[in-house]
Amino acid sequence: MLVENNVALQALNTFGIAARAQRLSRLRSEADLAGFMASPEWATPSSAAPVFVLGGGSNLVITGDIKALVLKVDIPGKRLVEETPKGWLVEAGAGENWHDFVAWTLAQGWPGLENMALIPGTVGASPVQNIGAYGVELQDRFHSLDAIDLHTGKSFTLDAAQCGFGYRDSVFKHTPSDRRSFGLAGRALITRVRFLLPKPWKPVLGYLDLERKMAETGNHAPDAQQIFDWIVAIRRAKLPDPAVIGNAGSFFKNPTVTPDQCADIIAREPKVVHYPMADGSIKLAAGWLIDACGWKGKSVGNAAVYEKQALVLVNRGGPAHPCTGGEVMTLAKAIQTSVYERFGIRLEPEPVVV
């Protein structure tokens, strides 16, 4: 596994932010990392020079050059592990493109991931964020994953309970607060992920955009491929293509409130978009809150709020004059302040900021 020096990162993050990595290695197999960690070049990660694991760069805001050793995860591979009466157990390498993997499972006749079509990023990053869309989260289809401990070089396997999944959250986003806790941020490198796609397949259709598609087409019993196609069309109509306009997808998490808090907001803002959750809480649409505060289309330098979807921040400068990470975060903080002052809601960013 070769170490490259002074590597440009603009093409390796979907926001298109210009920055450099002092050192970067491309990881194409578990053996690559094992060999590298056994070599004299390997420096034990420390607070001064930690390792930074990079997948597709789709959930990332870079605010400066990265001094850490960047491990770019490119591990390939897709396979059916086994088929049982309960479902299909499917595995993918951490470097596989998520959307391509979803399309591949459907092409093989294994439905279950279609609602998460067109989410940017890699398979290896999907458990970190517990990605989700249109009523399905990764944890709903997750079986287990393999990872390598960057401190010891040992491999290990985690099931869903050990991953500590929450809303856009997992054990991989937290550092240990004491010896008893199990935070793995900066320590675990995910190599392979397995999904259990259940039998019998049942469509998940409880979102307004999907209900509109059923009404428009007259198809009220869509198969998994039809749902996939609809969601691709919906997302392309609402969200900018990172290959055309740099962005990191949805920038803020949808906040959850109690029924009483929601009732108070509805009394002041009757049109607020909200969804009841299974646990009794209410999820509010962050994009609606941002739009209501007048941010759609506004900018700070070359960072802007996308005019078609206020939940997305974009790079208006393009490759030649890209926005900086500082501009993105200044804009994000201004939005947070505005939403809090009007609604009393604190928006939490989704992307990793480095």
Image (spheres, rainbow, N blue to C red):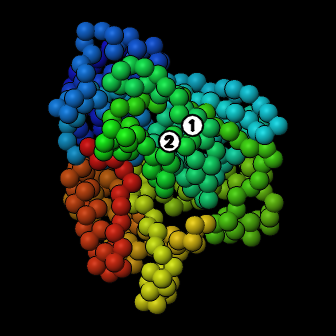
Q: Residues within 10 Å of mark 1 (few under 14, many from 20)?
A: few
Kind of residue indicated by mark 2 = Cys
Q: CA distance from mark 2 to mark 1?
A: 6 Å
Given residues 235 and 329, the one toward you in this image is 329
Q: Is residue 285 visible?
A: no
| Quadrant in which the C terminus appears | top left
Taking the image as shown, residue 42 lies to the left or right of residue 292, namely: left
Given residues 290 and 85, the one toward you in this image is 85
Q: Look at the numbered disc 1 and give the secondary structure of its residue.
A: strand
Q: Which residue is mark 1?
A: 159
Name the residue: 77% across, 53% down.
Answer: 202
Kind of residue indicated by mark 1 = Asp
Given residues 65 and 339, the one toward you in this image is 339
Name the residue: 22% across, 49% down.
Answer: 324
Tell me if label 2 and label 1 are in contact, CB under 8 Å: yes
Name the residue: 57% across, 55% down.
Answer: 133
Q: Is residue 49 visible?
A: yes
The quarter of the displayed image where residue 307 is located:
bottom left
> Farthest left residue?
48
Q: Tell me residue 113's x, y (percent).
A: 65, 46
Query: Which numbered disc covers residue 163?
Result: 2
Taking the image as shown, residue 45 lies to the left or right of residue 73, namely: left
Q: Tell me residue 193's x, y (percent).
A: 56, 32
Q: Residues within 10 Å of mark 2 (few under 14, many from 20)?
A: many
Q: Look at the numbered disc 2 and give the secondary structure of its residue.
A: helix
Q: Tell me residue 125's x, y (percent).
A: 46, 39
Q: Tell me residue 288's x, y (percent).
A: 45, 73
Q: Is residue 218 above or below residue 324?
A: below
> Farthest bottom residue?
267
